[in-house]
């Protein structure tokens, strides 16, 4: 574990790959992840955490959702999507986060959910969301996974954001898509 923090780049990379199999490894990997500057070592850390797919691993990755560096945020999203079932219980808190950027990124993680669950979470988000960009991200996912239960929430969102042309267009396209999929099932 010491090599994870004190070793040269190669030693840290090897330690990151091994730490996933060590008791307490997720916490150590999470601490190292926040300090690591080498992209290859960060990737090894994220890979080890992803393989663990445990609540501790998810909690080690979550702070990266707030990172200033886009590559770290992207790495966090990829890792959380890969840890699907371990990450799913954290989605409600991410979608309710005070930071709009975190809520927006959390919409991407909902793509791993079954359609009904994604619809429920994303409809809850767009019902209370004040940021048009966050709603747009949620609506984009609903266009892919949404069920008919999303239609009333989409209509209310359109009414709240009247005049936001890009959002009105997205809501119309998503609603049409959901309706056509629903009609195809009948």
Image (spheres, helix red, strand yellow):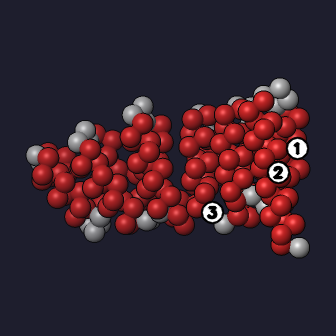
- Count of residue discs: 3
x then y, percent, for residue 172: 82, 44
Mark 1 vs 2, N-terminal side: 1
x then y, percent, for residue 8: 10, 46
Image mark for residue 28: none
x then y, percent, for residue 174: 77, 49
Residue to which mark 1 is pinned: 155
Residue to which mark 2 is pinned: 175
Mark 2 vs 3, N-terminal side: 3
Is 8 displayed left or right of 139 in the figure? Answer: left
> Badge 2: few (under 14), some or many (20 or more) residues near its Cα, within 10 Å?
many
Is 112 displayed left or right of 20 in the figure? Answer: right
Residue at image position (39%, 61%) is: 50
In the rendered view, tell whether residue 28 sits above or below residue 172: below
Is 131 displayed left or right of 79 in the figure? Answer: right
Residue to which mark 3 is pinned: 113
x then y, percent, for residue 105: 56, 43
In the rendered view, tell whether residue 167 sits above or below residue 79: above
Label 3, secondary structure: give it: loop
């Amino acid at each position: 574990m010491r090599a994870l923090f004190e070793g040269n780049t190669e030693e840290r990379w090897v330690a990151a790959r091994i730490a996933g199999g060590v008791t307490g490894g997720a916490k150590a990997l999470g601490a190292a992840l926040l300090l690591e500057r080498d992209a290859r070592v960060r990737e090894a850390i994220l890979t080890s955490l992803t393989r663990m797919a445990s609540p501790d691993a998810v909690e080690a990755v979550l702070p990266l959702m707030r990172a200033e560096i886009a590559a770290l945020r992207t790495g966090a999203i990829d890792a959380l999507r890969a840890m699907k079932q371990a990450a799913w219980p954290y989605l409600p808190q991410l979608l309710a986060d005070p930071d709009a950027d975190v809520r927006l990124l959390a919409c991407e993680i909902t793509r791993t959910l079954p359609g009904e669950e994604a619809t429920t979470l994303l409809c809850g988000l767009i019902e209370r969301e004040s940021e048009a960009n966050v709603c747009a991200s949620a609506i984009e996912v609903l266009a892919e996974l949404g069920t008919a239960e999303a239609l009333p929430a989409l209509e209310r969102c359109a009414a709240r954001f009247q005049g936001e042309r890009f959002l009105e267009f997205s809501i119309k396209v998503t609603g049409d898509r959901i309706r056509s999929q629903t009609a195809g099932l009948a």
